[in-house]
Image (spheres, helix red, strand yellow):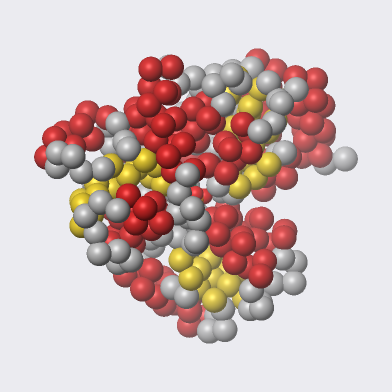
Amino acid sequence: MTDIQKLSERIRKLAREKNAIILAHNYQVPEVQDVADLTGDSLALSIQASKTDAELIVFCGVHFMAEAASIVCPDKKVVIPVAEAGCAMADMLTAEQLRDMKAMHPGVPVVTYVNSSAEVKAESDICCTSANAIQVVKWTKAPEVIMTPDRNLAEWVRRHTDQTIYSWDGYCPIHDELSTAAVKKARETHPEAVLMAHPECTAQVLELADVVRSTSGMLDYVRTSSATEFIVATENGLLHPLKKENPGKRFYEASPRMICRDMKKTGLEEIIAALETESPVVHVPEKIRDRAYRAVERMLQVPRD
Ligand code: 13P
Ligand code: SF4
């Protein structure tokens, strides 16, 4: 038995004993995704978690995701194996900055990407994910909308609606740094491949893409596509579930530099420690949770296309 198998068995045993559920984002390292009960994007994971009877949620991802689980599942204990695993984009906007932005555009609804802190969600009217941002903004029917914190997601939405979008200047460094030169090179190397890009990429990169999808959207797309080769313009952790689910298809990184260090901080040992100690706990205070939950709940009412 390999070390990974031994550690994974220990995790599964501890999870049974503690009535715990292990959630892992699509960007986590392969062995963490493999040992998890559920994998997916941040919001889908939280929603699924709220439907289980597990008492303990171990969220293998970054801090805002564990917070989202705590917002959606207030009666459960949520732990994150590595407390310092954060999201550079979520850290680019504080609640105070958002309050100042709202004061500049009084009465304009705020649509906030789930990659944000609970405090920022609490200052927002409705949340969105990379999968439903266009539908959410259209659903507001407001002539003007504030979109935070991702300028690239806001630009993607701007190109699909007539509404005026005021965006915050936040971005994901991993997606934002992907250059059109790197994408064109990948295209030349794999001329038959479908180019899939995440809306956190720049508008220039998205213009070159065949399909623009969230991480779960890319998994869905590949499942039903007749194409056999794909260039993947998002964090490279997604190649693991893509390859695992589609052994007959080929996947290529748009750039080897698309690695989110924070997403790679969690390993099997950290999960064992989190299960044993039931810490570090991520808890959103009720006053903030209540308002943040309203923004998340409103999003869930928006019909999908
Ligand atoms: P999704 O999995 O929701 O597409 O999010 C991507 C991301 O960057 C999460 O940090
Ligand atoms: Fe945040 Fe970007 Fe990492 Fe996602 S990939 S967690 S948006 S820094």
Q: Residue at x 72, y 59 (%)?
A: 244
Q: With respect to residue 61, does 76 lie above or below?
A: above
> Percent x, y for residue 246?
72, 65
Q: Is residue 85 visible?
A: no
Q: Quadrant of residue 44?
A: top right
Report the quarter where the N terminus lies. top right
Q: Is residue 129 left or right of residue 97?
A: right
Q: Residue at x 75, y 66 (%)?
A: 247
> Percent x, y for residue 98?
23, 35
Q: Considering depth in this image, is 83 or 25 the residue closer to the camera?
A: 25
Q: Considering depth in this image, is 292 or 254 the residue closer to the camera?
A: 292
How many marks on residues?
Answer: 0
Q: With respect to residue 112, does 99 lie above or below?
A: above
Q: Residue at x 48, y 79 (%)?
A: 187
> Percent x, y for residue 138?
34, 56
Q: Residue at x 22, y 28 (%)?
A: 96
> Percent x, y for residue 259?
49, 51
Q: With respect to residue 244, does 263 lie above or below?
A: above
Q: With respect to residue 229, does 218 lie above or below?
A: above
